[in-house]
Amino acid sequence: MNMVAQIAKAFQKILELSLSFLEEKMNFQELEEKLQKAVNGMGKDILEVILQAKDEEIKKDRGRRSTWEIVRKNDSRTILTPFGDITYERSYYRNKTTGEYLHLLDTYTGFKKRKRIDPLLEALILENATECSYQKAGREILPQGEDFTVSPEVVKRLVHHSPRNQSMDFPQKSGGTVMLP
């Protein structure tokens, strides 16, 4: 199924939910719950389809062919996004000049090696962690009904390794009182 057809199918589901509510086949709370689930599902589907399409575009790019050669196709990767887990397949390349190996799609999207959380979700977790506990920040940031959470340890690591915290000078303790710089 092509990208446009998949996206249209997701919008059709939302339309069907709206009609069910208008025809009084469900109450407003049911509509909200089902709509939220459908929108998150649609977001996941759209992201997966777009990532697959971008990988194909990179493969076909003539400029890329002069510098990078495909080593492997269909390497699977799962990333946690604000919509939930998305899984996509991408190609693995070798630079003909330097010998460097990369998944060009990951470089294009900003997904770093061995990181499972996308940059937008990281930012939302960091924002949430300033207002509540690490456990709550990791649990409440994801869509309802998902079977996963971001552990408090991961939230702590994100907070302590964020560029914002690395550039800050933290106050030093002296004799039980906090000394400001």
Image (cartoon, helix red, strand yellow):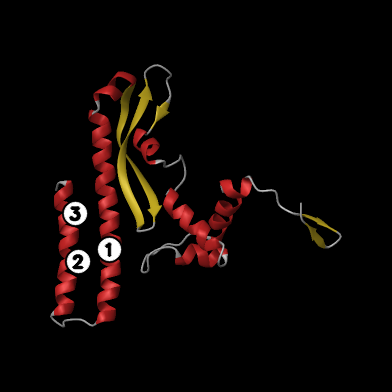
Question: From what the image shows, is residue 27 above or below residue 73?
Answer: below
Q: Which residue type does callout 3 highlight? A: Ile
Label 1, secondary structure: give it: helix
Q: Which residue type does callout 1 highlight? A: Val
Residue receiving disc 3: 7
Asked if disc 2 and disc 1 are in contact, CB closer than 8 Å, the reply is yes
Answer with mark 2 or mark 3, whichever residue precedes in sequence. Answer: 3
Q: Residue furthest right?
A: 175
**Residue 71 appears anywhere in the view:** yes
Image quarter for residue 84? bottom left
Q: Residue furthest top?
A: 97
Label 3, secondary structure: give it: helix
Residue 106 lies left or right of residue 22; in this view the side is: right
Answer with mark 2 or mark 1, whichever residue precedes in sequence. Answer: 2
Residue receiving disc 1: 39
Q: Which one is in front, 123 or 26?
A: 123
Circle 1 packing at 10 Å, graded few (<14), some (14-19), many (20+), is some
Expressed as whole percent of the image width and height from the top left, the position of residue 110 reads 41, 41
Answer with mark 1 or mark 3, whichever residue precedes in sequence. Answer: 3
- Residue ID at (34%, 20%): 67
Residue receiving disc 2: 14
- Residue ID at (19%, 66%): 14
Circle 3 packing at 10 Å, graded few (<14), some (14-19), many (20+), is some
